[in-house]
Amino acid sequence: MASGVKPRVKVPKTASAGDVITIKTLISHKMESGQRKDSDGNRIPQSIINTFTCDFNGQNVINVELHGAISTNPYFQFEATVPESGDFTFTWNDDDGSVYTETKTITVG
């Protein structure tokens, strides 16, 4: 597991049915490309977030595949239509098998 990884998510707490909301996500991650070497000349293994997904009440909203050219601390901003109250589940998968998740609840009223 990469050290110091911290997901951050901003989702409005409330909305009206059918509203289009803006969601912002950022995950603190070094995104090591696997091309650098340490002070002893050994290659540092690749460690990147390779997929990011967002689901709302179990239905996929966005699915992103990332590759080695992605910068440190990947940031995503996207819009979603909210039909009802529920939970957004955000998932980041790391090359090393680590999975980072965050859940945010929105109330439609």
Image: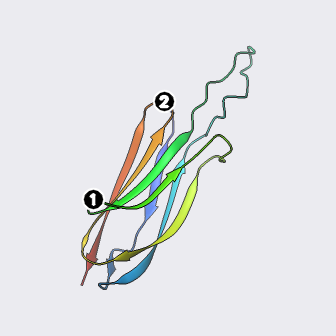
Q: Residue at x 54, y 66 (%)?
A: 77
Q: Residue at x 42, y 80 (%)?
A: 20
Say whether disc 2 or disc 1 marks the residue closer to the N-terminus: 1
**Does 40 appear above or below 24?**
above
Which image quadrant for residue 84?
A: bottom left
Q: Secondary structure at mark 2?
A: loop
Q: Secondary structure at mark 1?
A: loop
Q: Residue at x 37, y 84 (%)?
A: 19
**37 to the left or right of 85:** right
Q: Nearer the viewer, residue 91 or 12?
A: 91
Identify the mark at residue 79; answer none if there is no mark: none
Number of numbered discs on residues:
2
Q: Residue at x 58, y 52 (%)?
A: 74
Image spot of residue 55 (x, y percent): 35, 59
Image spot of residue 97 (x, y percent): 43, 31
**Would you call the spot at circle 1 few (<14 residues within 10 Å), some (14-19), or many (20 or more)?**
few
The residue at which mark 1 appears reads as 58
Under mark 1, the amino acid is: Gly
Image spot of residue 94 (x, y percent): 49, 37
The residue at which mark 2 appears reads as 96
Q: Nearer the viewer, mark 2 or mark 1?
A: 1
**104 to the left or right of 26:** left
> If the image is split into quadrants, where does the C terminus sit?
bottom left
Q: Label 2 vs label 1: CA separation?
A: 25 Å
Which image quadrant for residue 41?
A: top right
